Image (cartoon, rainbow, N blue to C red):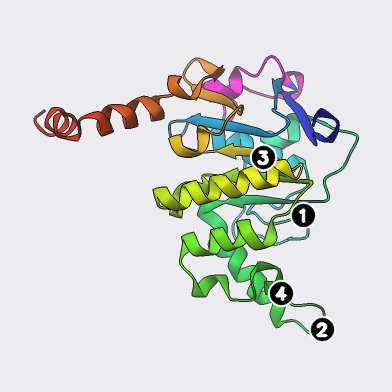
Amino acid sequence: MLASQFVFHLALQRDKVESFDCYPFNLPAIRSLEQRLELHPKVTFFVGENGSGKSTLLEALAVSLGFNAEGGSKNFNFGTRASHSVLHEVLRVAKGVKRPRDGWFLRAESFFNVATEIERLDEGPGGASVIGAYGGRSLHEQSHGESFLKLLNERFGGRSLFLLDEPEAALSPQRQLDALARLHELVRRESQFVIATHSPILMAYPDAWVYRFDADGIHRVGVEDTEHFRVMRSFMADPGRALRQLLDN
């Protein structure tokens, strides 16, 4: 599997950073990137609270690899609003000898824009139908969860690189399990994933590496050591007690 790994590690070129007092370099997780961050050959998770920098780093990785900042494959070239940081400009990414056959960058917050771009492309003259690669039905005519699963099942394939930012946003717990099963199928077909997530279900994928982003930097941890897992386990063990503690304060 190592021979087919597409991205090995990333590192911050600290000598090229003008100031660590400005965003995103003032984020503790980004500031702490003094050593290279190794990526698992199959699945790597970035986890942490909102604002911890996990999505910012994933976005920078995607842009540095040639993906559109708002999402899509490398063939997508559109921009609704330039909001991505300059982190990609000082990020060094170590790529494998083998190139992925395909790839996709998913951002939950801008997936609507990607679906709109697909429709715009299909309105143009000639060429194959773009939506045909996504099941043949407009992604706008499906729920957010349905359209993402269609993307996962119809568009994603083997020997590819996938960068996913909070893919669980529109998925029920059962659909997250369905997504996990599909992820495993794609991993067995030599695809590599880097995923920013809040979902304990997804981050429980066997043998994956989990990096926690917090005020102390970035640390590789076990899934049971994440706040996400501990909170969910505590709540499900005794919902009544958890709610009383929360609401009585």
187 or 94, which is in the foreground? Answer: 187
Of the numbered discs in the image, which one, if any, rests on residue 74? Answer: 1
35 or 2, which is in the foreground? Answer: 2
Give the number of marks. Answer: 4
Give whichever of discs 1 and 4 has the lower sequence position: 1
**Magenta-drawn segment:** 14-36
Amino acid on which disc 3 is placed: Phe
Residue carrying label 3:
193
Circle 2 sits in a helix, a strand or a loop, which is it? Answer: loop
Give whichever of discs 2 and 1 has the lower sequence position: 1
Seen from this angle, which residue lies furthest right?
97
| The N terminus lies in quadrant | top right
Give whichever of discs 3 and 4 has the lower sequence position: 4
72 or 6, which is in the foreground? Answer: 6
Residue carrying label 4:
121
Amino acid on which disc 4 is placed: Leu
Give whichever of discs 2 and 4 has the lower sequence position: 4
Please say whether residue 227 is visible from this viewpoint: yes
